Amino acid sequence: MKILLVEDSATLRHAMSHFVRTAGHEPVIAKSGEEALQIIEQTAVDLIIMDVEMPGLDGFETTRLIREWLGDHWIPIIFVTGMSEDESLEEGIDAGGDDYLVKPVSQMIISAKIRAMERITDMRNQLATLNRELKVLSQRDGLTHLYNRRTFEELAEKQWKIATRNKAPLAVLLLDIDHFKQYNDYYGHQQGDRCIQTISSVLAKCVTRPDDLIGRYGGEEFIILLPNTPEHGAHYIAEQIRKSVERLQIKHRASPSNTYVTVSIGGAALNYTTGTTWAHQVGLADKALYTAKASGRNTSTIQSADPHGLILVVDDDDASLSLISDILKGHCSIITAKSSEECMELAQELQPDLILMDAYLPGVNGYETCKSLTSNIDTEEIPIILTCQADSLSEVEEFAAKAGAKTALLKPLDKHKLIDKIGRFISPNSLSLP
């Protein structure tokens, strides 16, 4: 073990170093609490023996700072003190100490204390290993070792939020083993389990990026999440999986559609996750899977899950962005910007169907931004709705017309009027309120 000795007395440092070496360990010396903190930041140690009474930072305060620095990582700390009062012992334990040595310290006692701490460290390490293994087991399906449904959903929600933040595409695939009930009935459940395991191995070989997720969704159904994957990429992966399973030529004499085990795959791909939900996308993938089965099975069907229309919402107020997103969720895809510069960049790159812009942006305001958009050959055809707080709508509409916007809305926004205005420019039949 590498043992950090924190002691301001040269005599005691020499004696303690000798004891540690005699016990078969390597001493690391610190002459003060401040030096101990520097060593902890740079050197991994297995045990700390800490003098309590030191000038500057005493042993208790040094221990508190060490515990704060280490976080969840535990290193045993033994205090060395000339005091044996109960109050001192209690203060040391509260500071983060694990044991006490009362001066004078003998070779026999320090060796015994080190052995005891070694045993405790070993037990804690074993417990940590078991906890990690239990966590993995709780996240995995017992048969396939893929993520179970609960864990997959938790991880998928995180990936969904990342895609929303990065304005990135996202695809989900649902896979079903064709006529698996007949396979189970004909070959038995053990052979059925082996078939499921074989299919899961194919998935693991075809879906290999670090952020991709594969889960067993239930029975013979699997689910795959593909971050940063547009529709054509999802179709490519789905076909790779389908063809790989087909090439295995696992016999299926009970299948009414094929002599070998095959899979049907349904998928839904989103270019922008804002404006819809993860559950909605999975639902669309499920419908695509139904279509694949109805088409004769052993096929893949991938559809775009993007709602009708893409709206660029430009506002520096988080509450306004949240309100607009809630109103339009499921009706259209939404991307957001908080400044004129970001708006210009996204408008040119993504070519939204509509821009909904606040008139009073920080820096270059919405009026000037609107004029820039309508005078740019790449964005001049994109309709713009200006939003503004004012006494009358006619005042705002006059302001918007001068800027080149198509129309205007008063703030605070009324959801019915918002839907009505947007519906004039994109997919009016898809925009309605209950």
Image: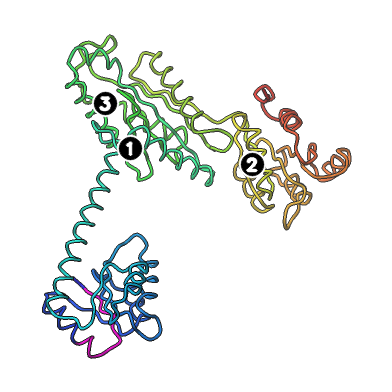
Identify which residue is drawn at 80% across, 42% down.
404
Check residue 5 for magenta coloring: yes
Tell me how far mark 3 sits from mark 2, CA to CA.
44 Å
Disc 2 residue type (three-letter) = Ser
Q: Which residue is mark 1?
A: 207
Check residue 173 for magenta coloring: no
Identify which residue is drawn at 80% across, 37% down.
407
Q: Which residue is mark 2?
A: 322
Quarter of the rendering containing residue 154: top left
Which sits earlier in the primary sequence, circle 3 or circle 2?
A: 3
Disc 1 residue type (three-letter) = Val
Q: Quadrant of the N terminus?
A: bottom left
As helix, strand or loop, the secondary structure at mark 2 comes to helix
Q: Which residue is mark 3?
A: 245
Looking at the rendered image, the disc whose residue lies closer to the viewer, 2 or 1, is: 2
Which sits earlier in the primary sequence, circle 2 or circle 1?
A: 1
**Magenta part of the chain:** 3-14
Depth check, front residue: 250 or 74: 74
Depth check, front residue: 144 or 356: 144
| Tag 2 near tag 1, CB within 8 Å | no
Image location of residue 263, percent across then percent down: 31, 22
Label 3 environment density (alpha carbons within 10 Å; few <14, some 14–19, many ≥20): many
Taking 256 as reference, is 411 left or right?
right
As helix, strand or loop, the secondary structure at mark 3 comes to helix
Label 1 environment density (alpha carbons within 10 Å; few <14, some 14–19, many ≥20): some
Image location of residue 118, percent across then percent down: 18, 65
